[in-house]
Image (cartoon, rainbow, N blue to C red):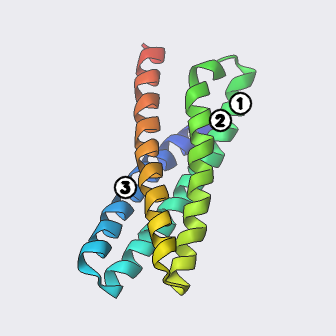
């Protein structure tokens, strides 16, 4: 399978699973249930891993496109995706830490970073979809 197909396939899930995790984190805040907290954590960790893999496959694809002089079309997405991938690494570390040490201050910082990252991830994906639509037509 070509890298662009792997990135596109994983990228879709790397947008949707973290969004689902955000909904579960909000449910955690509302219900204050341990089971919901653990389930949300599992979804966030899985989504973060997918997002990191999507970032790595996207970087590989970007460097491949640089050889074909098409990379400038995706420059904004590449820069945003680098920041988003780094944010997901931080989120992954923080959420694993929260499994073992429940600290309210860490959870607040984590939620702020997580919400901003999910929004940036959605926005970056939307820009790419429109860019591809314009570039391919």
**Residues at badges 1 and 2 in contact (C-beta under 8 Å)?**
yes
Residue 64, numbered label: 1
Q: Nearer the viewer, residue 13 or 115?
A: 115
Which residue is outermost to the front? Answer: 105
Whole-angstrom CA distance, mark 1 to mark 2, is 5 Å
Residue 88: give x, y in percent of width and height. 56, 56
Q: Is residue 63 left or right of residue 87?
A: right
**If the image is split into quadrants, where does the C terminus sit?**
top left
- SS at mark 1 in the image: helix
- Residue positioned 59% across, 50% down in the render: 85
Residue at 46 percent across and 22 percent down: it is 131
Above or below — where is 21 with respect to 80?
A: below
Residue located 67% across and 40% down the image:
59
Q: Which residue is mark 3?
A: 19
Residue 33 or residue 64, whichever sits in front? 33
Q: Earlier in the sequence, mark 3 or mark 2?
A: 3
Please give the name of the residue rendered at 27% of the width and 71% of the height, measured from the top-left corner. Answer: 27
Contact between marks 3 and 2 (CB within 8 A): the answer is no
Dot placed on the residue nearer the N-terminal end, 1 or 3: 3
Observer able to see residue 100 = yes
Location of the N terminus (image quadrant): top right
Q: Residue 3 location in percent, x, y?
A: 62, 40
Drawn side of residue 31 relative to residue 13, left or right: left
Along the line of sight, which residue is nearer the eye, 18 or 106? Answer: 106
Outermost left residue: 31
Compared to 9, does 23 lie above or below? below
Reading the image, the residue beneath label 2 is: 61
Looking at the rendered structure, which numbered label has been put on residue 92?
none
Relative to 61, does residue 54 appear above or below in the rendering? below
The residues tagged by marks 1 and 3 sit, at their Cα atoms, a distance apart of 29 Å
- Compute the Cα span from label 3 to label 2: 24 Å
Mark 2: give few (<14), some (14-19) or many (20+) Cα within 10 Å. Answer: some
């Amino acid at each position: 399978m070509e890298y662009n197909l792997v990135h596109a396939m994983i990228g879709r899930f790397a947008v949707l699973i973290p969004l689902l995790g955000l909904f579960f984190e909000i449910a955690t805040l509302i219900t204050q249930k341990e089971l919901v907290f653990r389930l949300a954590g599992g979804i966030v960790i899985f989504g973060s891993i997918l997002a990191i893999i999507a970032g790595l496959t996207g970087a590989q694809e970007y460097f491949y496109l640089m050889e074909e002089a098409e990379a400038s079309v995706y420059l904004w997405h590449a820069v945003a995706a680098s920041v988003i991938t780094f944010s997901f690494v931080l989120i992954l570390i923080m959420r694993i830490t929260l499994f073992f040490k429940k600290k309210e201050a860490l959870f607040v910082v984590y939620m702020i970073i997580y919400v901003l990252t999910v929004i940036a991830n959605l926005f970056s994906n939307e820009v790419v979809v429109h860019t591809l639509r314009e570039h391919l037509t």
